[in-house]
Amino acid sequence: MRTKHQPTNQPGTYLLLLQLPEAQQVEVGSLGLLSLKAGWYLYSGSAFGPGGIKARCAHHRKISPRPRWHIDYLRLVAPLREIWFSHDPERREHQWAELVRERRGSQVPQPGFGSSDCDCETHLLYTKQRPSFDGFRRRAYRTVVDHAMIKRESL
Ligand SMILES: [Zn+2]
């Protein structure tokens, strides 16, 4: 389902849904060579600098000629299918990573992925089946009182 919701240049938190079509080994910078299963990868991040989520997601939509973040390497082989985002004024990326992780069927493909600068075990979760936006949104609203609206852009 294609939607017209798109992140704006306001700050906020986002979650990228990448689909890896087949199992493969992927070189991810400092983490080295990872063996990744076919399926869905969910990566949480936030953008509180100039250009907000819109500018950051413009980066994630493209393939980086010089990968910098862990996710840039995965992005080389895994198409971006959806962006879930919220312009909530609080930085929610760690909370969102935890929410995805608590979901039944979620696995940690590689500890340390995307979480070099925080205490989370990972900011990348794996799930075999396509994850449910409505399910995630319900859990987020239930867990965080007054969470700002969470939207989805399908690509
Ligand atoms: Zn974190």
Image (cartoon, rainbow, N blue to C red):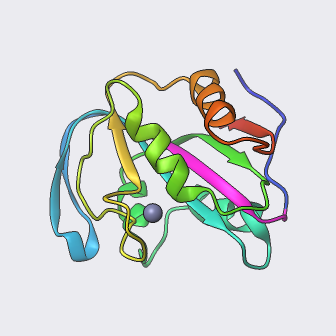
Is residue 16 rendered magenta in the image? Answer: yes
Magenta stretch: dominant secondary structure: strand
- Residue 75 appears in which quarter of the rendering? bottom left
Is 47 on the left or on the right of 148, as rendered?
Answer: left
x, y (%) of residue 123? Answer: 41, 56
**Front residue of this view, candidates 51 and 143:** 143
Is residue 139 rendered magenta in the image? Answer: no
Which residue is at a point 84% across and 65% down the rendered structure image?
A: 9
**Front residue of this view, candidates 42 and 155:** 42
Up/down of 93 relative to 100, above or below: below
- Residue 55 appears in which quarter of the rendering? bottom right
Q: Quadrant of ligand 1?
A: bottom left
Q: Quadrant of the C terminus?
A: top right
Q: Quadrant of the N terminus?
A: top right
x, y (%) of residue 103? Answer: 41, 29
Which residue is at a point 78% across and 79% down the rendered structure image?
A: 50
Is 103 on the left or on the right of 134, as rendered?
Answer: left
**Front residue of this view, candidates 150 and 28:** 150
x, y (%) of residue 134? Answer: 64, 22
The stretch in magenta equals 9-19
Which residue is at a point 73% across and 60% down the rendered structure image?
A: 12
Up/down of 87 relative to 65, above or below: above
x, y (%) of residue 95? Answer: 53, 51
Up/down of 12 relative to 17, above or below: below
**Front residue of this view, candidates 139 and 77:** 139
Is residue 19 among the parts visible in the rendering? no
